[in-house]
Amino acid sequence: MKYFPLFLSLLPVVGTAQTAKRADAARPNVILLLADDLGYGDLQCYGACGVETPAVDALARSGIRFTNVHAMASTSTPSRYALLTGEYAFRKQGTDVAAGNAGMIIRPEQYTLADVFHDAGYVTGAIGKWHLGLGDKTGEQDWNAQIRPSLESLGFDYHYIMAATADRVPCVFIENGYVANYDADSPIEVNYRRNFEGEPTGKENPELLYNLKSSHGHDMSIVNGIGRIGFMKGGGKALWRDEDIADSITHHALQFIEQNQNSPFFLYLATNDVHVPRFPHQRFRGKSTMGLRGDAIAQFDWTVSQVVAQLERLGLRENTLIILTSDNGPVVDDGYADRAEELLGNHRPAGPFRGMKYSSFEGGTMIPFIVSWPERMRKTGGTSDVLLSQIDLMASLASLAKVRIPDEAAPDSRDRLAQITGKSRKDAKYILEYPSNHNISIRTRRWKYIPPCNGSPMITWGPKIETGNLNQPQLYDMNSPWEAQNVADKYPKVVRQMQEWIDLERGK
Ligand code: NG6
Ligand code: CA
């Protein structure tokens, strides 16, 4: 493969005397496997029906399945920002869902989760969906040359990524800053404001949408018979085929693991599944009773099976800590006519929770969270209902790697390694949730509070999802998971306390 010589040539740089050794119990390999838009209820071990997820379920049996862990935000960019920096996304402008030509949102000077492992002497990799911007400035990248700065400035030794999402241009993978399989005969241009002359769009040429039609939006450039967000030109043989994205991401992940089997590694493996456009490979078609969305879940499960099998084959499974989770809650119709709504049957993507992706309700941030580390986590197959947020992964994994996070970095992340490895069930005092309308909400074990917020109770621009907006305070007793009965009037003291905590955090 193209990157091997390049990558091997990096080894002397990152391969200090310490890293020449394989991972050991003191320094396990770590794989953070982040699904996209996978809901709390989307896996069999969390109650999914209509699709089987044997590999994920086996992973859960080999470790702990958590039932009360939240993403920081209910969309991708802010959620991933918090996960990778340990800083609440609301502290920073420009952390909303990023365009494919966004400049880097995490700035090179920031300390990241990858820096943690880098400082611990690990080899670090990011493979799959990025969605946190590339290059210095929005719209100023040259996609035909090395894009800099890129993930190397955030602590990643190797990166093979999609700039944003599969529904956003540019529709190419980028490997260590260069478009993978670059086609010199077809230079790439990207623009999020206007089209390139003579290029068809979904809006004007719907007859060219031979793979998927859109249900809302997604009517700009057409790639692989699918309309996208944003305009692009060129790409040629570098353009991805949507049905091959999971194979491509998985393939590079397996190679990364193999290449680095003799050194502790940290792999941030962010799948495209199950984000739109859902267009899984032919061999997964019909695997579920739910059409393309369910088949994409089956494809995700396949990726998990391949990663685990690779670790087993290389004798690394025992001493690899795998964390499997998702960036935000689920969505059914997210802009393509893929029949996800019609074929849902009894399946409940958000499980017992109200709301989904984008929402202030729990379904926006409740996500699956599975941790497996056979070497150290011996009591397995259980569940934990400890209340946690992904914001704490950074401090927790720094604790695992025995790295001291520099002052000022990861200001909102706390060490909860004991909870994550099943040794403690002490809840976070509270966790914050950041929905797409920026109305920061808060959870404790017992309560959920949503501050008053004007605006429509339903999303108005496409997805059929409740926003959680109400022009009065909302307080729900989480002893019942579905946020049904607003008891704010009955517990004014609780409401005041919750609002105070939000104000305190926001004011920091
Ligand atoms: C929305 C897109 C949706 C998805 C989302 C980001 C439209 C109509 N909808 O704006 O399809 O891409 O952004 O999803 O454009 S996320 O999981 O990456 O945050
Ligand atoms: Ca997402």
Image: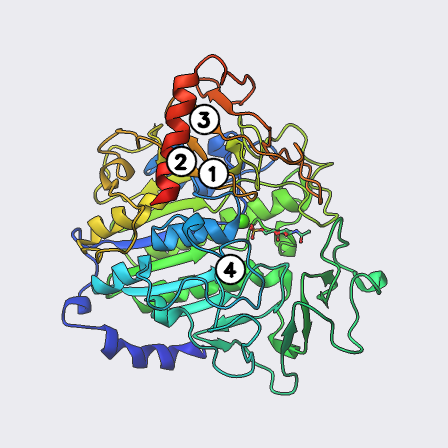
The three-letter code of the residue at mark 3 reads Lys
Amino acid residing under circle 4? His
CA distance separating discs 3 and 4: 29 Å
Give percent across and percent down for residue 471: 59, 28
Residue assigned mark 3 = 448
At x 69% / y 37%, what residue is drawn? 464
Q: Which mark is first along the chain, 2 or 1?
A: 1
Mark 4 or 2, nearer chain start: 4
Label whose residue precedes the other's in the sequence (3 or 2) = 3
> Under 8 Å from ligand 1: the CB of mark 4?
yes
**Residue lying farthest to the top in this orientation:** 490
Q: Quadrant of the C terminus?
A: top left
Residue that sits furthest to the bottom in the current view:
185
Q: Residues within 10 Å of mark 4 (few under 14, many from 20)?
A: many
Which residue is label 4 attached to?
A: 131
Look at mark 1 in the image and give the residue it sits on. 440
Give the alpha-carbon distance from disc 3 to disc 2, as whole Å: 12 Å
Q: Mark 1 to mark 3: distance in Å? A: 11 Å
User: In whole angstroms, how far apart are the C-alphas of marks 1 and 2?
Assistant: 7 Å
Q: Could you say whether the residue bearing mark 3 is in a helix, strand or loop? A: strand
Evaluate if marks 1 and 2 touch, with contact meaning CB atoms under 8 Å apart: yes
